[in-house]
Image (cartoon, grey):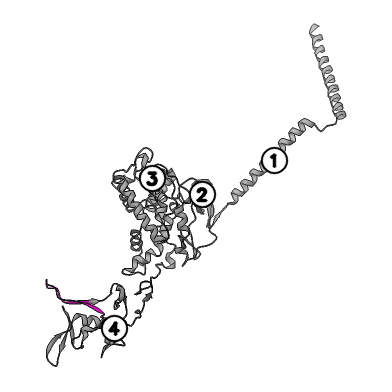
């Protein structure tokens, strides 16, 4: 029988009726050998490990001269700490032992079950498993939708239709819904699988409305690694990740795709139009998001130059993590343009001047943040800058992370409505008709298609009828005059 003591396993020697203490390193070595499947109850270990790996047992001759060990032993400390032991290279995997070049591996050169040999690092590593959600969860709202999906506040997003997960509509378009996404007023029938330009949707009601709220732009332009990876993992407790592998898995999956979306070319910002203001306040603004954005903007207001330097540093590191072939020094102008738009977003989100008239700072009990005009000047932007081009050259652009397990419908494209086609056809017809009639009357007035003799006869008839009428009228006048004389 045995019991666990403070210094290891205490074994009762019933024959001698006395106790003997087993060193923690011996217990650690036995447990590690069992986990590797090479434990032998007679000789401690199987195979070559039998002669090469320490047992930490006083019964093993010249044990200290063996070149390898499964566990590291620590002696009792001066402050009374107990003797202890732990597996070597346990940060990589229990049971691996030190190899040349400070790498870890099994004594026989093989990797334990569930691990693979990395030839680059010359060590055993656990394969990174894809960080994916279950299919039925794909079309539910994701934590990052509010700043990665255009027109999120107008109910654009992933949708499950007849078992198919439809992708969001691209920028400046919306899915065709029978109900107004804001007022719920019935305006027609649904055609969810199709996207329509906002200029055509509901009579152009949302034409000119921006695709993202200014608060969304603050988040889009401030996400960076490794903090985004940590946030991404924290939002998904169901991810099949554990220990030190979690961040690496997230960084190699959805996080990179989120970054490729948020790092796309920005646009110069302005105060929200009336409709957008209501949409953002209702569907995007939350105290948590406002608090996070306020902290970012307050730091920019108080330490603009330092914040800019830090932004360049963080963005450069993030770009290298997304694509190691990118040279951030060549993209400095594009990075600075994004910082300029970030300042615009901060000003128009938290400033209460006569232009912005925002109440968001007061909603979270903070003072307004208003930046000088020189800090929010319009940047020289293009729809596809070099930074965006370099990111687009890398496979796996957002939102491919969703379509692998739940393919999106291929027919959700931007379409032209029948109404626009009919209106265009009528306009062309009316134009041609006006041109034809105008030309006809001009020619008719100049040439007059009647023959000359016919015109002469028609004039004679008019002249004769006129003379007859005049004679009749004259007789009537004479009769009246004669009657008056009598």
Element at label 1: helix
Residue at disc 2, secondary structure: loop
Which is more foreground, mark 2 or mark 3?
3
Which residue does the numbered mark 2 point to in the structure image? 198
Residue topped by disc 1:
433
Magenta segment: does it hold 83? yes
Q: Name the residue under label 3.
A: 344
Query: 70 or 468: which is nearer to us?
Result: 70
Q: Which of marks 4 and 1 is nearer the N terminus?
A: 4
The quadrant of the rendering that contains the C terminus is top right
Percent across and percent down for residue 65 are: 22, 83
In the displayed orientation, state which residue is furthest to the top.
Answer: 485
- Considering only vertical position in the picture, is 451 above or below 224? above
Spatial separation of the CA atoms under disc 4 and disc 2: 65 Å
Bounds of the magenta span? 69-85
Of the numbered discs 2 and 1, the one sitting upstream in the chain is 2
- State the image coordinates of residue 407 (x, y, percent, origin top left): 49, 65
Residue at image location 42% in from the left, 53% down from the top: 330
- The reply to whether residue 357 is visible in this rendering is no
For label 4, the residue is 34
Q: Where is residue 419 in the image (x, y as percent from the top left)?
A: 59, 49
The residue carrying pointer 3 sits among few (fewer than 14), some (14 to 19) or many (20 or more) residues within 10 Å by Cα, namely many
Q: How crowded is mark 2: few (under 14 residues within 10 Å), some or many (20 or more)?
A: many
Of residues 375 and 464, the one nearer the viewer is: 375
Is residue 462 in view from this perspective? Answer: yes
Q: Which of 92 and 222 is in front in this view?
A: 92
């Amino acid at each position: 029988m045995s019991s666990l003591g403070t210094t290891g396993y205490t074994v009762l020697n019933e024959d001698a009726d006395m106790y003997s203490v087993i060193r923690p390193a011996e217990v650690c070595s036995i447990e590690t050998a069992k986990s590797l499947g090479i434990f032998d109850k007679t000789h401690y270990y199987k195979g070559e490990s039998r002669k090469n790996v320490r047992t930490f047992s006083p019964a093993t001759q010249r044990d200290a001269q063996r070149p390898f060990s499964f566990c590291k032993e620590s002696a009792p400390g001066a402050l009374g700490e107990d003797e202890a032991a732990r597996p070597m290279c346990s940060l990589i995997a229990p049971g691996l032992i030190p190899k040349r070049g400070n790498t870890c591996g099994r004594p026989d050169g093989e990797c334990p079950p569930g691990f693979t040999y990395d030839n680059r690092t010359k060590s055993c590593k656990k394969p990174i498993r894809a960080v994916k959600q279950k299919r039925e969860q794909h079309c539910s709202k994701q934590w990052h939708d509010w700043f990665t999906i255009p027109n999120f506040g107008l109910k654009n997003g992933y949708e499950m239709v007849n078992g198919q997960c439809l992708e969001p509509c691209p920028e400046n378009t919306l899915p065709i819904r029978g109900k107004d996404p804001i007022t719920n007023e019935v305006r027609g029938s649904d055609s969810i699988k199709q996207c329509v330009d906002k200029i055509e949707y509901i009579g152009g009601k949302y034409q000119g409305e921006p695709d993202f709220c200014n608060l969304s732009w603050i988040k889009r332009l401030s996400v960076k690694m490794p903090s985004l990876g940590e946030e991404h993992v924290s939002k998904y407790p169901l991810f099949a990740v554990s220990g030190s592998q979690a961040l690496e898995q997230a960084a190699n999956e959805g996080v990179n795709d989120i970054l490729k979306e948020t790092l796309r070319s920005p646009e110069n910002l302005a105060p929200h139009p009336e409709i957008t203001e209501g949409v953002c306040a209702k569907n995007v603004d939350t105290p948590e998001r406002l608090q996070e954005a306020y902290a970012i903007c307050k730091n920019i207001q108080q330490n603009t130059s330092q914040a800019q330097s830090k932004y360049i540093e963080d963005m450069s590191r993030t770009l290298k993590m997304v694509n190691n072939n990118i040279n951030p020094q060549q993209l400095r102008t594009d990075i600075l343009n994004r910082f300029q738009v970030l300042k615009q977003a901060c000003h128009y989100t938290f400033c209460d001047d006569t232009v912005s008239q925002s109440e968001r700072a007061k909603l979270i009990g903070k003072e307004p943040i208003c930046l000088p005009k020189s800090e929010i000047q319009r940047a020289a932007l293009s729809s596809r800058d070099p930074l965006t081009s370099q990111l687009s050259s890398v496979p796996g652009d957002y939102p491919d992370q969703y379509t692998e397990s739940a393919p999106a419908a291929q027919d959700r494209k931007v379409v032209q409505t029948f109404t626009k086609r009919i209106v265009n056809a009528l306009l062309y017809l009316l134009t041609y008709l006006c041109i034809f009639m105008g030309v006809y009357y001009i020619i008719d007035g100049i040439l007059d298609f009647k023959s000359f003799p016919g015109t002469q006869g028609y004039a004679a008839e008019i002249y004769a009828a006129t003379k007859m009428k005049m004679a009749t009228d004259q007789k009537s006048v004479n009769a009246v005059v004669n009657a008056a004389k009598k």
